Amino acid sequence: MKILGIDTSCDDTAVAVTEGRRVLSNELFSQIEIHGEWGGVVPNLAKRAHEEHFDSVYASALTKAGVTMDEIDAIAVTYGPGLAIALGVGIKKAIELSKKYDKKLIAVNHMAGHVYSCFAQNADGQPDFPIEFPYVVVLVSGGHTEMHLMKDHHTFTRIGTTHDDAAGEALDKGARIILDEAVYPGGPVIEKMALEGNPDFIRFPRPMERSKTLDFSYSGLKTSLLYKVRSMTEEERIKHQNDLAASYQAAVFDSLLYKVKAAMKQYKVNKICVGGGVAVNKTLRKKFELLAESQGGYVLVPSDRFLNGDNGAMIGVAGYFQALNEDFVHDVDTLERNARAAL
Ligand code: KG4
Ligand code: ZN
């Protein structure tokens, strides 16, 4: 079953063609440069850029996959969560295409997409591994930090979430504090600085470490960083920016790992699946690998860097498993965006 996967939930205009778990093409127009100078995503600019770039991204997704719309079986589109006016662009295009080519429509949750990005394979079916439930699913992006128990396809039970900022947001804000300038996204900047820094420079608090829940919290940690930076002179800050980044990143990741380990014990699950933009981070991946191995299991992360951030392929793969369940939109005109959709 070939699926056209569409995601316009935030700052990437993304269209892909997938077949089962295989990704035949995965095209993207990234708006990073448009939003970078503002230090965050500007909704109106995102909407306009999606409108301007959708048609060319869509055309190249078909061309790269070597297919025409006649060969596409269904269209999968993100309905939420995300930026409302950005989501609206992809949904409108998906409805138009569904009517024009008489294709079934599948409404996919963006966070489910991030989970399914871990199951995606390249066009040759690599990496070839079975999907073995249950997983502890960890979603770490700019807007979300949540943990789910995944017992079967599209069967999620939320077991932990953040009380305030998301892990990616904590990194984004942290980068701004450490560098004292608008940077976006901050996660990759912190990762790069951290590689050259000393993670033991300061021991930032590990929020929620003592709480019995599986929830997260990052705003206190960000405040600790802010106070630390304020206590330093400009010269000291610049001299130690790599150390600050390494120490801060370690605190963000430790707080995450601590709860994932607790969840694995509580639910007796030794397999982890990590999705979302923050999962690109190599230091974080290594920590997850060590944790899973220590429990006799393994960790799944997206196998290709284009599957880590927002992309259309993850929507196509997630949509495929919905299609197997006959989970289609019955009346395409009723499909609405849901900016705060939960998994
Ligand atoms: O999933 P995503 O692309 O967009 C959504 O938020 O849905 O995630 C973006 C987040 C940003 O907060 C960004 O700073 C973070 O992922 N990120 C990273 C890295 N690359 C992106 N965080 C840590 N290390 C990275 N290399
Ligand atoms: Zn995302």
Image (cartoon, grey):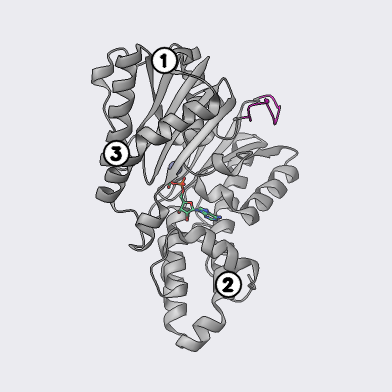
Residue 292 horizontal/vertical position (percent) = 69, 43
Residues shaded magenta: 121-130
Q: Nearer the viewer, mark 1 or mark 3?
A: 3
Q: Dividing the picture into quarters, in which one does residue 191 lie?
A: bottom right
| Pointer 2 residue | 203
The crowding category of the residue bearing disc 3, from other C-alpha atoms within 10 Å (few below 14, some 14 to 19, many at least 20), is some
Q: Which residue corresponds to the image point at 64% horizontal and 53% vertical from the top-left?
A: 282
Q: Nearer the viewer, mark 2 or mark 1?
A: 1
Q: Which residue corresponds to the image point at 34% horizontal and 11% vertical from the top-left?
A: 102
| Pointer 3 residue | 51
Q: Amino acid at mark 1?
A: Asp
Q: Nearer the viewer, mark 3 or mark 2?
A: 3
User: Is 259 situated left or right of 9 in this image?
Assistant: right
| Pointer 1 residue | 327
The crowding category of the residue bearing disc 1, from other C-alpha atoms within 10 Å (few below 14, some 14 to 19, many at least 20), is some
Secondary structure under badge 2? loop
Residue 246 horizontal/vertical position (percent) = 59, 68
